[in-house]
Image (cartoon, rainbow, N blue to C red):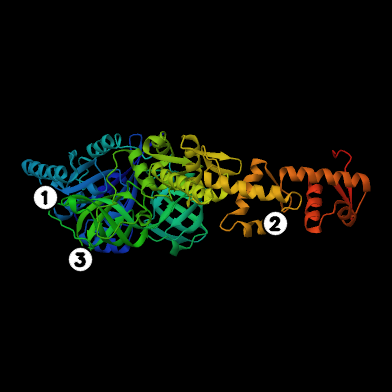
Amino acid sequence: MERRVVIGTAGHIDHGKTTLVRALTGVDTDRLAEEKARGITIDIGFAPLALREIAASVVDVPGHEGFIKNMVAGATGVDLALLVVAADEGVMPQTTEHLAILGFLGVARGVVALTKCDLAPDPAWRKLVADDVSDEIARLVNRRWPVVEVSAAQGLGLEALLEALAEEADVVAQRTADDRFRLPVDRVFSLPGAGTIVTGTVWSGTLAEGDRVTILPAGVAARARSIQVHGRPALRAEPGLRAALALAGLEREAAPRGAMVVSGDGWRASRALDVEVSLLPGVVLRSRERLRVHHGTAEVMARLARMDPAAAGATFSARLVLEKALVARAGDRVVLRSYSPVTTVGGARVLDPWADDVRIARGRASRGLPAAPRSDADRVRQLVARRGAPGLQRSALEVASGLGRARLDAALASASELGLAELDGWLVAAAEVDVVARRLQDALERYHAAHPLEPGMPAQAWRMAGSARRELVEMAEGRLLASGSGVVRDGVVMRLSGWIPGADRTTLAVQERVLAALREADAEPPSTSDLAATFPGVDVPAVLRLLVRKGEVVAVGRERYYEAGALERERGRLVAALRELGPATPAAIRERMQRSRKWLIPLLEWADREGLTDRQGDRRVLRARAGA
């Protein structure tokens, strides 16, 4: 596959960035009339550049301090820096600021073009400038970059510069196509017949003609009608390339600079980011300080709402509460600039892009802030664990973690070792499963204590006692049943292992008293309400259900229970009566058996249910197979 890389210029105003890009690519990146009239670059410009077998996209940024926010927008998504320093002037304020911004954006590799060498003919001077630039790069980016002397006006050193860029581009890590498509919008316009067109650098994933996308934070869906890469039609937009997307179904107002074009499910905009902040030397920030947050091509005001006081110094954990929503992923880089006067103060790496899901107790600033992850697996563990019982869907985790499907699958290969549990594509911290499991076990213990005569707790009511989402309760139930915890599923009820309802002396005595009353009543047993009045304070229905399970009592009707022996004798009397009478009405049977209707009718209905009799109109007939 062809290697692709985005090269971003950087450097002080009037050091020759745009002139150099034009000399290398043949493209004048100053497209605005105001830029041509004033002779300075105001907004970002773009040009293709072939480097051996590498397809490079050059992003030319303004050097004027008044347009730093445009510079940051252009620098986002850059893989390789082209730092331009005029040999006759050397390191200047925007040279340093641009280098710092590149460092905060994670751009580690670059090439220095020492321009206007024809205006600084003294080799010793040029070496002094080159050494000064190298020292500044080492201080701010912690690397050494190759320095190439050039003169765009005279065409000197251009081949050497191209060779140096190719060498560095060859070792730049390639962006993965195995990820969700993401493109920060840096420009939007409309053309007759094409509709709304957005442009930007593809950060990740691949988009083909006809694919569906979502523009966030507006949440508007659209379709990629056509795609261009550097002004030429293309079948797809791939990571590391500049692309223009003609989007059907999109109004221009829904996709301003700063919007994000994405594909797939799970994306969301957030009003808070938990980040690891790095500050420039000498910079001190206070809690609640207002900052400008630059992410992608967006600039959003924010408050430094929480910060780790134990990490006083250059690097610390913090929460940024945003005044407008951003679409970020863990691992993204942001640049921090002061509110007023506007200067670059630091940068940050996103640890949790959806921090508005996670509450941090007031007055406990550092508690709950994430630490910088040690690995992909650690990043995933943190993101899931911080959500508590709500957990995360795998599709949402793929977005939030910024890992893409393959890396996420690898990180989750041993989810249990990370302290995570998964069911049906939903992940939660194993500790949350333990909490619900304990809640369910406690509910069962309380139920047994409150209902000593019942065989167990109805399974549905027991699961509801978990007070959690279905997947979490299912995980907890599975863990309890498989772990030897003593929880047992017994038909439609749950019970503790070894549970015997009514086994204590008190309840055994109560059972015997109720049973004796039924046995004494024989064929004319008292109703449930009569028994309750006879035994105040006793849960008579529960005692009767227990005796039914033991086989000592039979439920004939809702309010009528017989002692088993008494019912068997009454059954024999009914069979004998029907053999003598043949098909008979209840009145005839009552006359024959000498039973009141309040006992006879429930008995007859029970006999129908048991298959002892058949009802034919108002008569009962003994079934042929009925015994004596």
Q: Which residue is mark 3?
A: 340
Indicate left or right for 60 with 146 as reference.
right
Q: Which residue is mark 1?
A: 88
The 10 Å Cα crowd at callout 3, few under 14, some 14 to 19, many 20 or more, is: few
Indicate left or right for 525 with 581 as reference.
left
Question: Residue drawn at (13%, 50%), measured in percent from left and top?
Answer: 91
Residue 150: x %, y % from top left: 19, 43
Decide which of 599, 421 is in the foreground and name it.
Answer: 599
Above or below residue 9? Residue 409 is: above
Say which of marks 1 and 2 sits in front: 2
- The answer to which of marks 1 and 3 sits earlier in the sequence is 1
The 10 Å Cα crowd at callout 1, few under 14, some 14 to 19, many 20 or more, is: some
Identified by mark 1, the residue type is: Asp
Question: Residue drawn at (82%, 43%), measured in percent from left and top?
Answer: 572
- The answer to which of marks 1 and 2 sits earlier in the sequence is 1
Identified by mark 2, the residue type is: Ser
